[in-house]
């Protein structure tokens, strides 16, 4: 079985991270922004796993487990806040959330 070079994994992770960063900067829908942040976290996870495989260590996989835990908490808390804001504003457009301004 042929070994896939680590460079390909890193290139895929860079593409995924760039798409996620572009989505966070361009899109205005908060659900899409959450998905783009998750895509960026998964790109970082792919990088951790690629380097763990390259160096024969399990440390990268432990970091992936921690990042997945943080991502799950972020989704739970973020969606709870989003639902509460939707009840008050009746929109998921990020430009309509001006009630948090000081």
Image: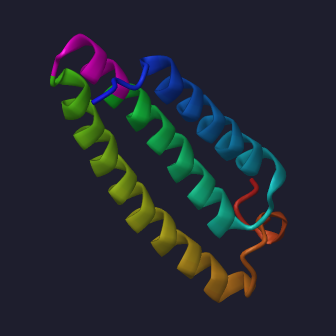
Is 44 placed above or below 89 here? above
Q: Which residues are magenta?
A: 50-57
- In this rendering, the count of numbered labels is 0
Instruction: Name the chief secondary structure element in magenta.
Output: helix
Q: Along the horizontal axis of the image, is 66 left or right of 13? A: left
| Identity of the residue furthest to the front in this view | 1
Spot occupied by residue 38 in the image (x, y as percentages of width and height): 51, 51
Is 79 placed above or below 45 here? below
Is residue 84 shown in magenta? no
Q: Judge by depth and name the residue closer to the eye, 96 or 61.
A: 61
Q: Along the horizontal axis of the image, is 60 left or right of 40? A: left
At 26% across and 25% down in the image, what residue appears? 60
Q: Along the horizontal axis of the image, is 87 left or right of 70? A: right
At 32% across and 48% down in the image, what residue appears? 68
Is 53 placed above or below 71 here? above
Spot occupied by residue 97 in the image (x, y as percentages of width and height): 76, 67
The quarter in which the N terminus is drawn is top left
| Identity of the residue furthest to the top in this view | 55
Q: Judge by depth and name the residue closer to the eye, 24 or 100.
A: 24
At 52% across and 25% down in the image, what residue appears? 8
Is residue 56 shown in magenta? yes
At 65% across and 82% down in the image, what residue appears? 86
Spot occupied by residue 75 in the image (x, y as percentages of width and height): 43, 62
Is 86 placed above or below 95 here? below
Among the 4 quarters of the image, the one containing residue 25: top right
């Amino acid at each position: 079985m042929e070994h896939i070079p680590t460079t390909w994994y890193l290139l895929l992770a860079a593409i995924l991270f760039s798409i996620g960063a572009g989505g966070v900067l361009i899109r205005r829908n908060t659900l899409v922004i959450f998905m783009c942040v998750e895509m960026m976290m998964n790109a970082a996870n792919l990088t951790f796993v690629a380097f763990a495989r390259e160096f024969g260590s399990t440390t990268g996989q432990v970091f992936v487990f921690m990042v997945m835990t943080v991502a799950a908490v972020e989704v739970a808390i973020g969606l709870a806040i989003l639902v509460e804001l939707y009840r008050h504003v009746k929109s998921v457009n990020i430009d309509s959330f001006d009630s948090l301004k000081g």
